[in-house]
Image: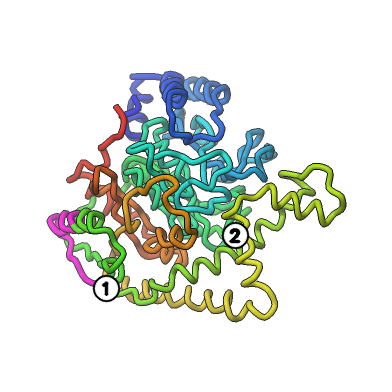
Amino acid sequence: MHNLTIAEQIKGLKNRDFSSLELTQHYLNRIDNSNLNAFISVTSDQAINQAKMADSILAKGNAASLTGIPYAHKDIFCTKGIKTSAGSKMLDSFISPYDATLSDKLNSQNMVMLGKTNMDEFAMGSSNENSYYGPVKNPWDTKKVPGGSSGGSAAAVASRISPFATGTDTGGSIRQPASLCGITGLKPTYGRISRYGMIAYASSLDQAGPMTRTAEDSAIILNAMAGFDSKDSTSANISVPDYTQNLSKSLKGLKIGLPKEYFSEGLDKGVEKVVMNAINDYEAMGAKIIEVSLPNSIHAIPAYYIVAPCECSSNLSRFDGVRYGYRCDDPKDLNDLYLRSRSEGFGDEVKRRIMIGAYALSAGYYDAYYLKAQKVRQLISEDFKVAFKEVDVVMGPVSPTAAFDLGSVKDPVSMYLADIYTLSVNLAGLPGMSIPAGFSDNLPVGLQLIGNHWSEELLLNTAHQFQMVTDWHNASPVE
């Protein structure tokens, strides 16, 4: 059952080939036997109850399209009555009193939550080594990283211990682990999926999205996830199409842009070969390849690592040891309470980004750093606007390399460089995808698809057509 896509599982439940309870128990057994550390919490009892309820709804014949389908939820989304930790010691004891809007939407479909997936602390990282609960391992090679911050979600889908998982993408945290684990990951346009109840890292960049095996599955899930939410001031009040409707549309005449800046020094030769082979496949399908330029993309890393830490220093100020979350033992006074609660509750990378952000926002430095970074952000956005006058979709690598060894990157700045091809998409608020495109040294490599605002339908169609003529998305690290 675990080798079936979501589309196939929906059909199987409808035809009574198996029950939701059987499907759920099958995945729970696989989770029990997994050694990847992909989950922080496994909600077995709740999952069994949800599956039984789903089966009774299916039997009555009035079920929603995703009723009875199991999934894994990134542990950054609030889930009522269940621990929501964001991968941090700071929230290790936090039991959310409410559901995130996304949790509500999936619950309304009567889906089955298997548990909460491991992640880099507060979504800060590119390797899933920054989690309080230990690193996640890549199912293709357990000595390698799965990517981050949604590494637990990516590893769970790739290892077939969950048919799909939710993820969040602030600077590439859906696309990069999707690439490194060989699955399909979609970061929608900023504002397409509600951020209400998603623990904030950088509010102007964070975006939820689906992590699945196939583009068709992503389209099915996005139908359930997308939509306006009055509780989220950054949610876009724009109608949601049926993302499955145009998956079969021909790509003949599609104009694909290749940014020359994405194929320069620093890109691993094996990764480049995989990406170019995929581009050739698109050309064979009738697409037209056009070179484009994104001249300000070279400034994406410094701009992002000013904007995101500034926003995180503000968002994480609420974790002070007073209202909820970790609190130090026996504080001497209020200052000691703040100092030790935050010092003991946050990990090194989170503290590093809070300090960078606090410095950049401080008096005398705001104009020199934060304001300038926002101006560069606008230039990056303008580059894409110019490119999309010529092309329909921009393509390139997701990550400069395939998965690297756990513990091999010690320097934080070197780690930041792993995001060089993904950050611009977040800074511009655009939709982006990673789809499996091949292997380099027996490790999966993703192809990145970038679209104009609100063009998820086109991206999914473009990805699905590629998966109709290739088999990379069916490759599995497990039986």
Task: Give the amino acid at mark 2.
Answer: Arg
- Name the foreground residue: 316 vs 429: 316
- Say whether residue 218 is left or right of residue 99: left
**Magenta region:** 277-291
Q: Is residue 410 in view from this perspective?
A: yes
Q: Which mark is residue 29?
A: none
Determine which quarter of the picture holds residue 317.
bottom right
Mark 1: give few (<14), some (14-19) or many (20+) Cα within 10 Å. Answer: many
Q: Nearer the viewer, mark 1 or mark 2?
A: 2
Residue at image location 22% in from the left, 71% down from the top = 291
Magenta stretch: residue 286 in it? yes
Residue at image location 45% in from the left, 60% down from the top = 416
Which residue is denoted by mark 1 in the rendering? 292
Task: Give the amino acid at mark 1.
Answer: Val
Determine which quarter of the picture holds residue 309.
bottom right
Query: Which image quarter is the N terminus in?
Result: top left
Which residue is denoted by mark 2 in the rendering? 352
Mark 2: give few (<14), some (14-19) or many (20+) Cα within 10 Å. Answer: some
Q: Position of residue 362 (x, y in %)?
A: 68, 74
Residue at image location 63% in from the left, 61% down from the top = 354
> Considering only vertical position in the picture, is 108 above or below 293?
above
